[in-house]
Image (cartoon, rainbow, N blue to C red):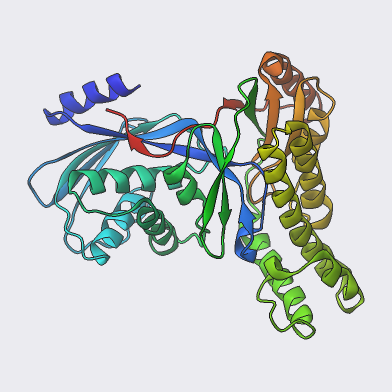
Amino acid sequence: MIKNLQQVFRDRFQKEPLVIGAPGRVNLIGEHTDYNNGFVLPGAVDKRIYVAIAPNNTDTVNVYANQFGESFSFSVNGIEPRTGWMNYLLGVSYHIQQKGKQIGGLDVLIDGDIPVGAGMSSSAALCSGYGFGLNEVFKLGLSRMDLAFIGQKTEHTFVGVKCGIMDQFASLHGREGHVMKLDCRSLEYEYIPFEFPDYKVVLVNSMVSHSLAGSEYNIRRQQCEEGVAILKKHYPDIATLRDVTPEQLLKHQEEMSPVVFDRCSYVVYEKERLLAGCEALKNNDLAKFGQLMYATHEGLSKKYAVSCTELDFLAERAQTIPGVVGARMMGGGFGGCTINIVNTDAVDNFKQTIQEAFNGLFKKIPDVYVTAIQDGTRVMA
């Protein structure tokens, strides 16, 4: 893809580009924990957004999206939000300027192989790749964490999505053969080995859009906050569910409604699962890690109530297929993908079996994406 991208860029702009590759991400465990200041465990994958970029000595940025055959231009002076995907580039340009950095005009070509709507965060990868490119071309001296915050601010202010920092962080900080234990409160992180050459990370798309995710997400946040308010009366030092132990939660179960208790219970035990999962990976115990993934799905489905019939079917069916060591729904819920860890030799059978089973019940053939854990955003050419 890179050679083709370079040629299209030369033909269009008559110059040589710098090519940046920014990966999508998966999150192995630690779902709905970020806004409770907990931990997440993402990894960058081998599906990327590619940004070919070169300065043009004007004050205009000319962008061509190769996948869609769309182009647009904007001045680096007086940037304001528009409608559509160009807001990601407008927002990154604007927030880099807000940090006191000078940027000039550019010619930009965008392409990629991250499946849209698969929950691998193609939007975060676009922000990361474009921001990284600006940083390289104009020698801005921004750190990877600076660029992650710029991507997050872009989502908040230009796109209108109040996302956490995980997606941008993972795209920029990925390391081959490792996942990243990110503390969403302190933003400290640790690379955890994930070196299992005989296994692949396989996503199966439920073919259900995340239509409920936004409104229900806000309700879950409110329910978590309600639980914290009750516990805070007894333990004033508690700021979020991150600070709550299982013992504290169980002691005050009677003071909460059953729904609020279930929501809090899921988050408190998910933190425990993530920490146990990190230890399992350090001990090279993939079987133990897989069991924790199954438990996470059960919690997301029954306690946090963010699954759907299709996701439950995929996660439960995966457990019966030889070569699968772990499976769960991934992401905000109400649609999207399951994430499965599958023995490399069993991937073809897994794909055929899960597609046939799903099609038999839901009359749709789900998309399956086979990925591996790779390095974060970098110069590719």
Looking at the picture, tell me which residue is in the foreground, 243 or 304.
Answer: 243
Q: Is residue 117 visible?
A: no
Residue 161 in picture, x, y percent from top left: 49, 59
Is 104 situated left or right of 115 in this image?
left
* Residue 145 quadrant: bottom left
Quadrant of residue 369 in the image?
top right
Direction front: furthest residue: 283
Farthest left residue? 57
Q: Is there any visible trace of residue 300 in the rendered image?
A: yes
| Residue at the farthest right position | 254
Is 293 above or below relative to 213? above
Q: Which quadrant is the C terminus positioned in? A: top left
Foreground: 86 or 268? 268
Q: Residue at x 83, y 34 (%)?
A: 316
* Above-or-below relation of 31 to 69: below
Q: Position of residue 288 (x, y in %)?
A: 78, 37
Counting the numbered discs, the total is 0
Q: Position of residue 189 (x, y in %)?
A: 53, 53
Q: Residue at x 40, y 59 (%)?
A: 149
Q: Is 137 drawn above or below residue 45 in the view shown?
A: below
Examine the image and state in which quarter residue 270 appears.
bottom right
Compare residues 151 and 325 and report the one nearer the observer: 325
Q: Residue at image x 70%, y 24%? A: 342
Residue 224 on image: x %, y %: 72, 69
- Above or below: residue 367 compared with residue 62: above
Q: Quadrant of the N terminus?
A: top left
Residue at position x 74%, y 82% from top? 232
